[in-house]
Amino acid sequence: MENLEINNESRQQLSSDLFIPRILICVFLFFLFLLLSDYRRTDLSTSVTYALIFVGLVFLLVSIIRRPIVHFDATALHIKNAKGDERLISFIQLESVEQTLFNYGLSSYFSMYKINYMDRGNLLSFKVIVNSVGNPTAKFQKAVEAVNPNVAF
């Protein structure tokens, strides 16, 4: 990876912070906790079902919280993981940006993209969930095409 200068002022966020899904999952977890705490009034199979849904939602919430945050500026992607480590991917390294099946009819608020890039001769990829509000994808595409017009969108 190239050593690129980090400039926080010109960065724009590409990935969504998934704030609304986080809140909704927390509300569902709260109500499931209330249902589970009243286990004496419910039968065992219903309690097990609630417990399984609760565990599934906890895993979903943890996976949402641990998703990397992706910013971009005029020359590179800045990917910050849950630990706070940051990785830079120059727009020169990008090969393609593809919409995933998540985009087709499933959501008008969120979109998911697969970003393919070259690193030390290997083709690598990662997925990013983008909030459709404010159209950060169009700004990202314009910034990438200014540096590397060969990237397939």
Image (spheres, rainbow, N blue to C red):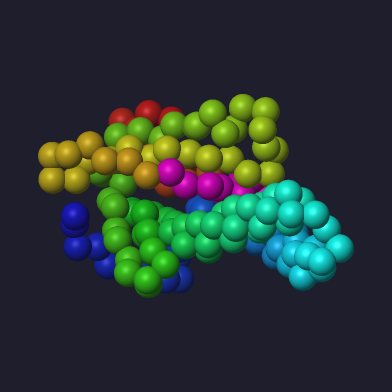
Question: Looking at this rendering, what residue extends furthest in the right direction?
Answer: 41
Residue drawn at (19%, 57%) of the image: 2
Q: Position of residue 23 (x, y in %)?
A: 71, 63
From the viewer's perspective, is residue 110 above or below residue 85?
A: above
The quarter of the picture where residue 145 lies is top left
Which part of the image, by quadrant, shows the C terminus? top left
Answer yes or no: is residue 28 visible.
yes
Residue drawn at (30%, 61%) of the image: 87
Question: Looking at this rendering, what residue extends furthest in the left direction?
Answer: 121
Residue drawn at (77%, 70%) of the image: 37
From the viewer's perspective, is residue 149 above or below residue 74?
A: above
Residue drawn at (61%, 27%) of the image: 104
Q: Position of residue 36 (x, y in %)?
A: 75, 64
Which part of the image, by quadrant, shows the N terminus? bottom left
Which region of the structure is painted magenta? 127-136
Q: Position of residue 111 (x, y in %)?
A: 58, 40
The quarter of the picture where residue 86 lies is bottom left
* 67 left or right, relative to 23: left
* 146 left or right, relative to 5: right
